[in-house]
Image (cartoon, rainbow, N blue to C red):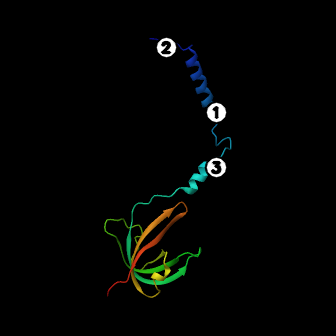
Amino acid sequence: MVPDYRSPGIIVLAGLGVWLASEQSAAQHGMQYPVAEQKQEGVAMQIKPNKTILQGKVSRVERSADGWGADVDIAVENSTAAEGYLDFVQAKPGSTVTVFAAEPGAVEVGKDYTLTTKVLGGPKGERVVIESVDVPKR
């Protein structure tokens, strides 16, 4: 069977193809999509499950700038991944790591702690958050 290139369907499809090929993109027209931008702000990032055990001495506890929780500095003596999790913090012994504490009263400056932490993320960045606090037995 030989196709009939004069049929109305073929002519319409050919015309549509020529029009689409010659049409400029929306970006070239200066069009913006505010709905897409709104969706972008509300998107939460998915980070792989991770958990790091930090052992060391707390050197600073300071209220967070937004007034909720505190930023805690810990001088790291040991850092390991919790069993079955990835270590996203990867702190080296001798380094200082800043973590976020939702309950600032759980830690005090000058004391040794074992902190279970995890990296949480969102569209505006990421932070290391204390999940649990233990006082090591020595």
Residue for point 52% across, 12% down:
4
3 or 2: mark nearer the eye: 3
Label 3 crowd bin: few (<14), some (14–19), many (20+), radius 10 Å: few
Q: Secondary structure at mark 1?
A: loop
Q: Amino acid at mark 1?
A: Glu
Q: Name the residue that disc number 3 marks.
A: 34
- The quarter of the displayed image where residue 14 is located: top right
Residue for point 54% across, 60% down:
123
Q: CA distance from mark 1 to mark 2?
A: 28 Å
View extreme (top): residue: 1
3 or 1: mark nearer the eye: 3
Q: Position of residue 62 (x, y in %)?
A: 54, 81
Against 39, residue 17 (above or below) is above
The quadrant the N terminus occupies is: top left
Q: Name the residue that disc number 1 marks.
A: 23
Label 2 crowd bin: few (<14), some (14–19), many (20+), radius 10 Å: few
Q: Name the residue that disc number 2 marks.
A: 3
Q: Secondary structure at mark 2?
A: loop
Left or right of 28 on screen, residue 108: left
Q: Position of residue 79 (x, y in %)?
A: 37, 75
Q: CA distance from mark 3 to mark 1?
A: 22 Å
Q: Secondary structure at mark 3?
A: helix
Dot 3 or dot 1, earlier in sequence: 1
Query: Which mark identifies residue 36?
Result: none
Label 1 crowd bin: few (<14), some (14–19), many (20+), radius 10 Å: few
Q: Amino acid at mark 3?
A: Pro
Dot 3 or dot 2, earlier in sequence: 2
Q: Position of residue 100 (x, y in %)?
A: 49, 74
Residue for point 49% across, 80% down:
104
